[in-house]
Image: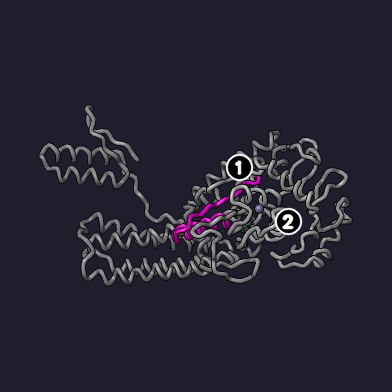
Amino acid sequence: MKIYNTLSKKKEEFIPIEPGKVRMYVCGPTVYNLIHIGNARPMIVFDTVRRYMEHKGYEVNFVSNFTDVDDKIIKKAIEEGVEASVISERYIAECKKDMEAMNVKPATSHPLATNEICGMVEMIESLVEKGHAYQAADGTVYFRTRSFKEYGKLSHKNLEDLQGGSRSLLVSGEDQKEDPLDFVLWKPKKDGEPYWESPWCKGRPGWHIECSVMSKRYLGEEIDIHAGGEDLVFPHHENEIAQSEAANGRTFARYWMHNAFLNIDSKKMSKSAGNFFTVRDISEKYDLQVLRFFMLSAHYRSPLNFSGELMEAAKNGYERIVTCVANLNYLLEHGASGDLREEEKALAGEAEGFLEKFDAAMDDDFNTADGISAIFELVKFANTNANENSSAGWIRALKEEILQLSDICGLIVEKKEELLEADIEKLIQERQAARKAKNFARADEIRDQLQQRGILLEDTREGVKWKRV
Ligand code: AMP
Ligand code: ZN
């Protein structure tokens, strides 16, 4: 399996630190509003990376934080006249709803910055002790960027260029720094803001330190993969590397993965530019599975332009798979029987080829666009090679393959139609009649059929009761 590593600018063979295990950290959203579909891109992309690794047999420890203390959260809290935690808790809950609706699996851990302040203070103390950080007169603690010799290795910038670019900072009032390149680790509180005690002043952490600390706490000092959107490469991830490697004295993350932007009219979709759609907006018009399909129809390192036409194309593509599975289910429910026949065995071998094609695409830096093409080929093959003369074994095998590949992409393609209560009651009556007539085979068949549709029957003294499971 090859992964493009931003650090080396090359595709590299993936070798985990511990065989069979993956430790992965994905920078999560700042929670002050509903997430937009640009924020949804890394969620969907890295959830798919995780699913594929699990499919390959890895045990994935997947950590993704919520930044729950930040200027924008505080501003919103002041506007509403509530505590900052009211805002962050509200939008964490909303974000989790959106994630579930997009079929993004919950992380193994979802740490919150405000629960990890102790660890942040400890790491900053150790950086001060080692001479990598210093306290300015107003209590702010800065990271001494030049003390970390490899600064710039992720974003491929050199210190001299950065120095030129940041000279204006000196003029604009960040006057307590030793060097314009230094960045904040801890800052003093302002009136009305949440704050914590620290050896330097009452205040709160800078943004970058939280990920260094949470990654270490939940995954260890050295991890396999660190990921996020490409806007995080500089300065966020560059600063995370400097802090972690200076504090721990070892490599922070081996592979750095970054998704390209979701654009609108070729401009990055963002809250600040105002050119965004929330996931909630999209859910009013589309099943969010269509959004997921749309995101995966491009390679994660290619910019993706959002448009109505592309969403319609995604809808058609997604429905092609859903329809195929529905047709296979129809054949299964209408008389297909028996195990895989001799003449179908050769076809089954051919169908395996699509799985290999899918894996080959995903092994090549998670090429979901080609992976989806392999699913389409399998769908076409199923449409051609399954019909009312096919055995149930063959139809089931095809369906399982389509479901397996779709599930790796996190796409739910089997629509379970809910049985209406009236239909359930009718089937129960038919089962009672069959039992009375001692036709136990039919009675059992009805019980199994209901069970398959998620209805569990219980024979009680008051009669038959049922529940959905
Ligand atoms: P934020 O809440 O702005 O820190 O963003 C959370 C995550 O969404 C980060 O990984 C960002 O890089 C990512 N992100 C934000 N906007 C976009 C976009 N338009 N396209 C792709 N990723 C984005
Ligand atoms: Zn981060």
Q: Is residue 251 above or below residue 451?
A: below
Q: Is residue 264 magenta?
A: no
Q: How is the image coloured?
A: one colour
Quarter, ligand 1: bottom right
Q: Secondary structure at mark 2?
A: helix
The residue located at (67%, 41%) in the rendering is 114
- Residue 348 figure quarter: bottom left
Q: Which mark's residue is nearer the viewer, 2 or 1?
A: 2
What amino acid is at disc 2?
A: Ala
Which of the two residues, 198 or 277, is positioned nearer the viewer here? Answer: 198
Q: Is residue 173 visible?
A: no
Q: Amino acid at mark 1?
A: Tyr
In the image, is residue 465 above or below residue 43? Answer: above
Horizontal and vertical percent position of residue 273: 69, 55
Q: Residue at x 25, y 37 (%)?
A: 425
Residue 46 lies in the magenta stretch: yes
Quadrant of the frame with the C terminus: top left
- The magenta span reads 41-67
Q: CA distance from mark 2 to mark 1?
A: 34 Å
Expressed as whole percent of the image width and height from the top left, the position of residue 206 reads 74, 48
Q: Which mark is residue 246?
A: 2
Q: Is residue 189 left or right of residue 250?
A: right
- Please tell me which residue lies in front, 453 or 164: 164
- Mark number displayed over residue 91: 1
Q: Earlier in the sequence, mark 2 or mark 1?
A: 1
Q: How many marks?
A: 2
Q: Position of residue 395 (x, y in %)?
A: 28, 61
Could you say whether the residue bearing mark 1 is in a helix, strand or loop? helix
- Residue drawn at x 69%, y 54% as measured from the top left: 248
Number of residues whose C-alpha sits closer than 10 Å to that of mark 2, classed few (under 14), some (14–19) or many (20 or more): many
* Of 207 and 465, the residue lying toward us: 207
Residue 444 found in image quarter: top left
